[in-house]
Amino acid sequence: MRAVRSPAFAGQLYPAGGDICRRMIAQLLPPGPPPAGPGAIVPHAGWVYSGSTAALGISAVAALHPDVVVIFGAAHGPDRNAASLFRAGAWRTPLGELEVDEHIATQLERCVHITACEQVHFGEHSIEVQLPIIQYLMPGVRIVPISVPPGPHAPAIGQFCGRVAKESALRVAFLGSTDLTHYGPVFGFEPHGHGEVGIRWAKDVNDRRFVSLVQSCAAEAVVAEAAAHHNACGAGAVAATIAAMRDLGATRYEELRHTCSAEAKGLGEADPLNSVGYEAGVFLYPE
């Protein structure tokens, strides 16, 4: 039976209507083209907070006109697998359906650490929120969604996926989805106190610890870093993305934007106590 994942967060994290989605995406897009690369890191909060940051990373990947986008998602709910693959079918969004590339997915399923498990994806938002932007920028592109919890096998998973992409006749690009430090009383994490001082530490110090490892393409270090300092919820997805990029020969990471929800504009009065960090960046080939 063909699996079709319906939107679970339309109307909450992004608009539920197709026309409204298109209008909002047009507003989120950067004014000029970002550097093009085979992979990017993107955040996954509500569009009013992180949509313009996510659009930067997705735009960088879209500039290479891929046939397939492999999306490594964070795992916010139960997932006992080292990686959970949505192997066949489609994901429905307000803009229509995105087909899963079964050819690439079948090859990825050969990895001993990747398990076909569609159920994990039905209540997870980290991949879903990217999809309408992907559809808007890359009409007709196919996807391969993979949930990657923060475990020891994440780099090996990414390396295997990179190898499959390198050997494929298709143009395969990658997205890794994570948010950064969740700071404040609502998250139970306030090591540097209430309010602005703590939120500033979260962005300028704690987030930067994690981002610096991404910039160094240190796939083997990011999961332990996030576990120790609570500065990324999608460290497994990031580790897999970095490892895939290394296998494809992309050795540089260019940061496109680092911001946080406390800096989001046009949302009324900002939350003075709680904030989440957002990062977008693109992996590039050697100059």
Image (tube, helix red, strand yellow):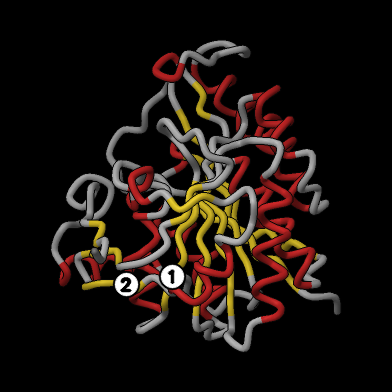
Count residues near mark 2 (Cα–Cα under 10 Å), then give few for <14, some for 14-19, many for 20+: many
Figure quadrant of residue 57: bottom right
Secondary structure, mark 2, is strand
Residue 49 visible in the displayed image: no
Q: Which mark is residue 143?
A: 1
**Residue 84 percent coordinates (x, y):** 48, 48
User: Image point 37% across, 68% down: which residue?
Assistant: 133
Total of numbered circles in the picture? 2
Q: Which residue is mark 2?
A: 98
Above or below 206: residue 68: below
Figure quadrant of residue 18: bottom left
Figure quadrant of residue 170: bottom right
Above or below 22: residue 256: above
Check the picture and name the quadrant holding the N terminus: bottom left
User: Image point 63% across, 67% down: which residue?
Assistant: 39
Secondary structure, mark 1, is strand
Name the side, left or right, on which 254 lies relative to 93: right
- Between 57 and 66, the one nearer to me in the picture: 66
Check the picture and name the quadrant holding the C terminus: bottom right
**Residue 213 percent coordinates (x, y):** 78, 44
Mark 2 and mark 1 residues within 8 Å of each other at the beta carbon: yes
